[in-house]
Amino acid sequence: MMERICIAADSTFDMTLEMVQQYGIEVSASYVRMDDTDYLDYPDLKQSDLFDYFRRSKKLPQTAAANPNDYEMLFKQCLENHDAVIFIAKSSGMSSCYANAVIAATEMENVYVIDSLSISSGSALLAMEAVRLKDTMSAKELVEHLTAYRDKIVGSFIIETLEYLHEGGRCSTLAYLGASALQIRQSINIRDGKLVVGKKYMGTYKRALKEFIETMLAQHELMDPSVVMISHSIQDEAMLNGLIDQIKQLNYFEKIIPLSVCAAVACHGGPNAFGLFFVHK
């Protein structure tokens, strides 16, 4: 008899409610604070609410991880009809989600917490792989497989404005003003679970996006063709469709899955951030 394994994840993996139901994944929400009120970032908080709040108040919404108690409740709920839980946590290099989930798990049997070393679609790719294989191996074997698979996931974002990073204290005033004046668009790579500054693109954001996709997918034949994921906060649907078309023109990926980024990502990347995530062969 195979173990019945429950796959669960932090809401920062950005899957839509529809996908979560389709894959049968349990979700732990994080918190967002605006005007002294705490909201859950999942499933009802919209990107536009965050951006409207910032425009109105000139203050960034504050994001906070779920606490150990939240995780403990989730794990207990999962274990009611499963033998084991594998939890995909937001990168330990970006948040205390992983640490808090580990605190909750240490008190419990058969709860495995995986540091996704990623965020957004990077964590979603890990969760999708977990669901694909959960009925074919034990929880321990699946954890081993996912830990190796995690190292093949690559992700990078480009952001239109450094305003949100600057406001959050993650980018100096000088860099912010320089980039604004010179129309420099910054890309940000996920490396070893942390956000690191990537290539700079010059000119209009439309042009920068096109170049970013070309650069990211230049060596697409080294990527697993089954799926490429988009994580974005693009506000204009026509613009998003144009970018998806650019990827389609490669005739390489079987599936292109666009996901809207959660509050934690949107609060740093601001409107119109665009990320690509894929798996190395």
Image (cartoon, rainbow, N blue to C red):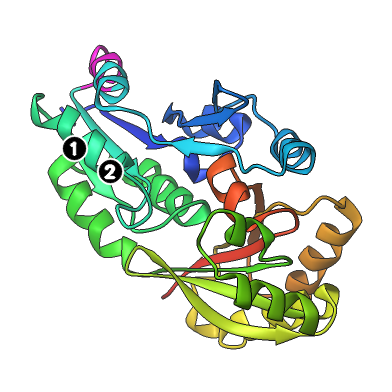
Question: Is 35 covered by the magenta stretch?
Answer: no
Q: Is residue 175 left or right of residue 92?
A: right
Residue type beneath disc 1: Val
Q: Quadrant of the C terminus?
A: bottom left
Residue, disc 2: 98
Q: Is residue 94 left or right of residue 231?
A: left
Position of residue 145 relative to residue 58, above or below, is: below
x%, y% of residue 172?
55, 70
**In the foreground, 98 or 280:** 98
Residue type beneath disc 2: Tyr
x%, y% of residue 116?
33, 53
Q: Quadrant of the N terminus?
A: top left
Q: Which mark is residue 102?
A: 1
Q: Main secondary structure of the magenta part?
A: helix
**In the foreground, 252 or 108:** 108
Stretch of the chain drawn in magenta: 75-82
x%, y% of residue 151?
31, 68
User: Residue placed at 66% from the left, 66% from the top?
Assistant: 162
User: Residue placed at 25% from the left, 47% from the top?
Assistant: 114
User: Residue placed at 43% from the left, 31% from the top?
Assistant: 25
Q: How many numbered marks appear?
A: 2
Question: Is 78 covered by the magenta stretch?
Answer: yes
x%, y% of residue 206?
84, 74
Q: Quadrant of residue 207?
A: bottom right
